[in-house]
Amino acid sequence: MPWRERGGGANIKLKLNAARVVLVVAGLLASAGVTAAPTEYQVKAVFLFNFSRFVEWPAAAFASADAPFVVGVFGHDPFGSDLDEVVKGKSVNGRPLVVRRLRRAADGAGCQILFIHQSEQRHLSEVLSALERHSTLTVSDIPGAAQRGVMIRLVTEGGRVRMRVNVESARAAALVISSNLLRAAEIVVGGE
Amino acid sequence: MPNTPFRHKLMRMVLLTSGLVILFTCAMFVTYEVVTFKQSVAQQLNILGKAIAQNSTAALAFDNADDARVVLSAFRSDPHIVSAALYSKSGELFASYPDRVAREDLPGTLQPEGYHFERQHVIGFEPVRLNDMVLGTLFVKSDLRAIDQRFRGYGLITALVIALAVLLAYFVGRKQQTEISRPLLELAETARAVSDKHDYSVRARSSGAQEISQLTEAFNHMLAQIQQSEIRSRAQMQRLSLLQHITGAIGDRQDLPSIFQVVLRNVEENLPVDFACVCLYDAATATLTVSTLGASSQRLAAAVGLTTDSTVPIDENGLSTCIRGRLVYEPDTHKIPFAFPQRFATNGLCSLVFAPLQVEASVFGAFVAARRAPEAFSSGDCEFLMQLSGHVALASHQARLNGALRQAYDDLRQSQHAVMQQERLRALGQMASGIAHDINNAISPISLYTDSLLEREPNLTDKGRAALTVIQHAIDGVADTVARMREFYRQREPEMTLALVDLNVVARAIIELTRAKWFDLPQQRGVSIELRSELSSTLPGIMGAEGEIRDALTNLIFNAVDAMPEGGVLTVRTLARPGPGETELVAVEVIDTGIGMDEETRRRCLEPFFTTKGERGTGLGLAMVYGMIQRHSAEFDIESAVGRGTTMRVTFPAYTQPLIAAARATDVHAPMRRLRVLLIDDDPIIIKALEDALVGEGHVTVAANGGQTGLEIFATAHATAHPFDLVVTDLGMPSVDGRRVAEGIKSRSPRTPVIMLTGWGSRMIAEKEIPAHVDRVLGKPPKLNELRTTIRELLA
């Protein structure tokens, strides 16, 4: 009987879909690193990933149509494997997310998001000038970084990670930051 | 509420209808609103939730609870939001609105995406998504006071709308109703006025809407119809009462002229008409004869030419239709080309009605009514005239029947009287018959002896012979008188035996016989009647029954005498005159100079029981004469004039054949052989006379004084060598009468002739009542010659 065979097939498919949903949720929870007590850099890794969601890059920011979305870490890598865990299997607008650890400032131009560790405090200006005319979202937890031209500075206040956004820098880099993000962040003006 | 005025009902209907419509509309609207508003509340909450969720992405993504609270505080714009909360991906409360939210305003567990109503609240769960990533869940709870408020608003509006609508409907309805109900009330008022006052000339005023004015028109039309029919019925009533009056009046009258008169007078005065008359129809001549004219119609009738007894021929004009039994109405006589209606037209009578007077399909007359104005007779008038003519016809018919009945009653009374008279005569006749019988017996010996003496005694002196001849004639006279007396008792016409009769002889005899009537009785009264006997000397004989002719002549003479109470001349005349062809007629006339007869009497005088003599007459005299005349093929003429006397003439055909009678008497005296004769009679004198007569003839007689004795003697003699050759017996004897004697004789000796003598004899002969076993019957007194002839015939 055709209908019974078809019905049986549909049921099996539904069960499969349900199983997949469960797996995805479990994966997300796992990838987000939401565990009992996340460390500071575990949170910051998630932040980095989340920026890919709240910021729009111009097409020119990518070397090619199928170029990956690159999250770069310049300087000392505080995340360990946490960042890799977070972006693993993720993609932005069809581009697979990849993490690259950079040694040279010039390499930052190939990244869409570049985390500049405190260890590079001295080379900040160099890094920033290297990234001029590149649509790279610069993120750093160096104190006063935002004022110095870093687009988003991550500040830890009372055990919570907060953002300070230099909108001008971002605009200069032709990046559009979501108003949602801006509302959750503190806006700073550069050059002070 | 059947007594509630119409307009209240109408108003209530309008208000109820409009209220219900509005209520229904509002209910539908509110229901729709409730459903859609709930949906819209849920939808609004959904939109709001989605917006808030969208705005909460960063707060969740970057773990900023403060920002989340700020975002949630946007719910403050909606006062109905009871609580809201953001939950992290792991289901922990991240932020809430208001900040310090009551525990019961937050859900126990998170539920899948969607909004639902829970008691007085709408609860929604909205996932906070960033692209395809779920960051957490937004919970929103809103109360439904908005709905309540809205419903209250709706209720208020509905109530207000209904109130306004009803108010508006009331005013509009009242205005409209006035337009409808006012003409209706006016109609009702008019109807009441009409029914109260019976004034059908009132008309309702036409106004208002088309339907109402149609109603009013219909009402007015109805009133007009009622008015017309009321006028008609009133006229009908008047005609009916007139008809009743007339029929009552004619019911009291029995004769036609009086009936017609009363009808005409009433119709002229009360219908009324200008001209009225009644005509009678004569089918034989096909004419109408004016019988009676109305009192007021006389002058016009003279002008029209319809005076009393004038006739109108029936041709193929309206009258012929009337005569066929149908009412004819000519609305305008000027337009009728026939002569009769034109006579009316020229005299100014334009409307003309002929109503047939008809009884059982036969029209015997016509009722004619006319008016001056054209078309002046309504159908009701015609109907009335038709009915009236029916009544008149019936009354006339009844009057005629009544007349006929009276006539029949009179005739019956006369018949009864005559029958009584006849009964008296019959009793007298019976008595006379008995007397005649006795007289016949008594004179039998005288007759026999006288005959014997005259025949057998040659030595009689002339004087003695003359005396005996007188006796013989006297006896003959007595016998004749007795025979006539017996005629009274004769009930049936005898078989007429015709004989040659000489009218002169009869006339003479009757003149003598009736002398008492025409001479003695008038003389006693001091009146003188002169009798003239004018008998023709050369009169031929006729064939007839002399007795009947004598009776008839006697009657005629009696009548003539009765017609001359003051005296006069009575002429009895006989004459002969030539008849048609070779025949000759003989007439006898009885002429008086008395009072004569008028036409009526002359016409009826031959009717049985018709008499002018009152109690003295039977009314049968001339009837008897007429009967005789018919039997003799004679003719009867009566010439009479009042005061000039009467001539009664009976004309017989003459008998001219040669006479052959009396030839038989030639050998009466021839010798005859001696016979042995047995004589049986209870009367010894008759026995003696018969013995003497027969012995004188040379016969041997044996006498027996009774029937029984006679039979014994006959039987004894029959056994011997000398039986009897002849038996002569009386009829009436005690014990064994003549019939039984004859029977006994014939049973013993059938060939022995039996002659019966009887005082009733001639009647028996006349009526052919000769008893069985009797050869011949002879009446008493027996004539010697007759007896001799009979014996000779029987034993020759």
Image: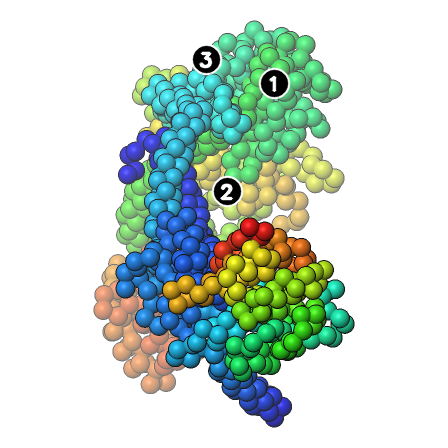
Question: Does label 3 or label 1 sit earlier along the sequence?
Answer: 3
Label 2 sits on a secondary structure element that is helix
Subunit bearing disc 1: B
Label 3 sits on a secondary structure element that is helix
Marks 3 and 1: which is nearer the front? Answer: 1
Q: Which residue is mark 3?
A: B269
Q: Amino acid at mark 1?
A: Glu
Q: Which residue is mark 2?
A: B627
Q: In front: B531, or B370?
A: B370
For marks 2 and 3, give the CA distance. 58 Å
Please tell me which residue is depicted at 23% across the width and 69% down the height of the picture: B735
**Residue B471 against residue B268 in the figure, above or below:** below
Question: Does label 2 or label 1 sit earlier along the sequence?
Answer: 1
- Provide residue B335's location: percent of width, then percent of height: 71, 18
Please tell me which residue is depicted at 25% across the width and 73% down the height of the picture: B708
Quick one: label 2, few (<14), some, or many (20+) residues within 10 Å? some
Q: Which residue is mark 1?
A: B375
Quick one: label 3, few (<14), some, or many (20+) residues within 10 Å? few
Subunit bearing disc 3: B
Label 1 sits on a secondary structure element that is loop
- Provide residue B541's location: percent of width, then percent of height: 60, 42
Q: Amino acid at mark 2?
A: Gly
Q: Residue B691 lies in what quarter of the image? A: bottom left
- Provide residue A19's location: percent of width, then percent of height: 51, 86
Q: In front: B529, or B325?
A: B325
Quadrant in which the N terminus of chain B is drawn: top left
Question: Does label 2 or label 3 sit earlier along the sequence?
Answer: 3
Using the rendered image, report if marks 2 and 3 lie on a common chain. Answer: yes
